[in-house]
Image (cartoon, helix red, strand yellow):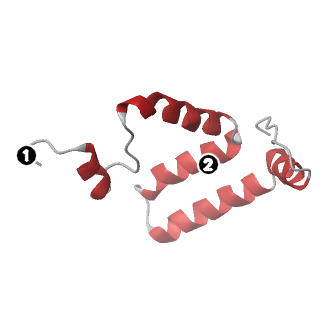
C-alpha cells in the first residue's frame, strides 16, 4: 500500500476501529485500559486465544475449541462473580478462577 493516508481513512477502511484527536487520545486510552483491567482475566485470556486460533485452524475445529473455552469460562468462579455483581448492581471483583 504505497503512500500515507489519514487516521480517518484508516478508520474508514477498517484498519483501526477508533480515531481520537490528539487532546483526547490519552484519556481515551486510559479509559480503555481501565475497562480491560477491570475485566475477567479468564475471559480476556480466552478471547485472545480464540483470536489466535481463528487464524490457525479450520472453522469446524475452531468452533469446537471456542465452544470448550466458552464452557470453561462460563463455569468459572469469575463468571459467577460477574453474575452476582450484575444482580447486586455493583462492579465485579475477579480472581482469575
Whole-percent x, y for residue 16 in the image: 35, 48
Looking at the image, the residue that sits furthest to the left is 2
In this rendering, position of residue 37 left or right of residue 71: left
For residue 96, side relative to residue 2 (left or right):
right
Give the residue number, with chain letter if any, for mark 2.
46
Question: Crowding at label 2, few (<14), some or many (≥20) Cα neighbours within 10 Å?
Answer: some
User: Can you tell which of label 2 and label 1 is closer to the viewer?
Assistant: 1
Q: How crowded is mark 1: few (under 14 residues within 10 Å), some or many (20 or more)?
A: few
> What residue do we see at 63% from left, 33% from top?
34
Q: What element carries label 2?
A: helix
Q: Which mark is residue 43?
A: none
Q: Mark 1 points at which residue?
A: 2
**Where residue 2 appears, x then y in whole percent?**
7, 46
Q: Earlier in the sequence, mark 2 or mark 1?
A: 1
- The residue under the point 44% across, 34% down is 24
Q: In which quarter of the image is residue 93?
A: top right
How many numbered callouts? Answer: 2
Mark 1, secondary structure of its residue: loop
Q: Are marks 2 and 1 in contact (CB under 8 Å)?
A: no
Residue at position x 36%, y 31% in the image: 22
Instruction: Determine the CA span between mark 2 and mark 1.
Output: 36 Å
Q: How far across and down, in percent of the image, does residue 68 sit?
A: 67, 60
From the viewer's perspective, is 7 left or right of 31? left
The image shows residue 26 at horizontal and vertical percentages of 47, 28
Q: Which residue sits furthest front?
A: 23
The quarter of the image holding the C terminus is: top right
Direction from residue 25 to residue 79 in the image, left or right: right
Residue nearest the viewer, comparing 55 with 88: 88
Residue drawn at x 81%, y 55% as measured from the top left: 75
Amino acid at each position: 500500500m504505497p503512500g500515507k493516508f489519514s487516521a480517518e481513512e484508516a478508520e474508514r477502511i477498517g484498519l483501526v476501529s477508533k480515531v481520537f484527536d490528539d487532546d483526547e487520545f490519552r484519556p481515551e486510552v486510559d479509559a480503555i485500559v481501565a475497562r480491560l483491567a477491570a475485566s475477567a482475566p479468564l475471559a480476556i485470556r480466552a478471547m485472545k486465544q480464540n483470536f489466535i486460533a481463528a487464524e490457525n485452524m479450520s472453522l469446524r475445529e475452531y468452533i469446537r475449541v471456542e465452544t470448550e473455552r466458552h464452557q470453561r469460562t462460563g463455569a468459572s468462579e469469575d463468571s459467577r462473580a460477574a453474575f452476582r455483581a450484575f444482580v447486586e448492581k455493583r462492579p465485579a471483583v475477579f480472581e482469575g478462577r
